[in-house]
Structure formats: structure tokens, C-alpha cells
Amino acid sequence: KVQEQASIVVRNLALEPDNEEAIVEAGVLPPLIALLRSPYERLQEHACVALRNLSVNDVNEMKIAEEGALPPLISLLRSPDKRIQQQA
């Protein structure tokens, strides 16, 4: 439950362009990427959306790739959950 709420907060804060780089600099990428591998689909979905929101920023986009988010995102494209596929 805490992980879900935290990922929702990051997801929402990342909608504001002024927050994007600060969120990544605060170290949020490793935990978000770990949530992509969660057995819970809701956590996967929230992590995908948060990463998508953060990736709008070019600097963050590179950091997200460098931190290793692409393999789990690609894996989620095969999820049975259509919402997760769309977000990945």
C-alpha cells in the first residue's frame, strides 16, 4: 500500500515540469524501476506512468535508460493487462 501511494505521488509530482529533474536527482529511479518488476499490476502501472511523466524531460529520458528501465518496460509490453501495455 505504501509503495502504491508513493508511486502515485511521484506520478503526480512529475506532471509539473519544474519538478521533473529534481525528482530524478532525489533518487527515485531505482525504486520506480524495481516496481516495474513487482508482482502487483497496480504498482507496475503506476511506475510506468511515473516514468513516462519523468521521461518528457530529455535529461531524465537518458537517465531512465541508463538506470536500466528499458528491459522491464519492454517486458511489460507483453503483460496480459492492456492498461500496463499502454503505459509501458
Image: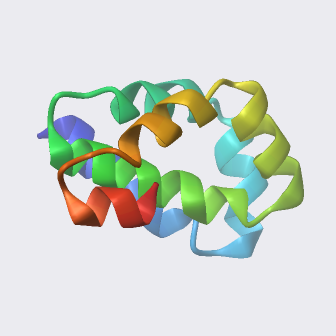
Query: Image point 78% across, 48% down: which residue?
Result: 60
74 or 54, which lies in front?
Answer: 74
The residue sitting at the right extreme is 59
Q: Report how many numbered discs are placed on residues in the image.
A: 0
Compared with 79, 88 (above or below) is below
Query: Image point 11% across, 40% down: which residue?
Result: 1
Compared with 20, 80 (above or below) is above
The colouring scheme, among rainbow, by chain, secondary structure or one colour, is rainbow
Query: Image point 56% across, 29% down: which residue?
Result: 71
Query: Image point 88% across, 50% down: which residue?
Result: 59
Q: Is residue 10 visible?
A: no
- Going by the image, does 85 lie left or right of 55? left
Residue 70: where, in percent of width, then height? 61, 35
Residue 56: where, in percent of width, then height? 73, 66
Q: Is residue 23 visible?
A: yes
Residue 31: where, in percent of width, then height? 46, 27
Compared with 5, 87 (above or below) is below
Q: Using the rendered view, name the quadrant where residue 3 is placed.
A: top left
85 or 54, which lies in front?
Answer: 85
- Going by the image, does 17 lie left or right of 80? right
- Going by the image, does 67 lie left or right of 14? right
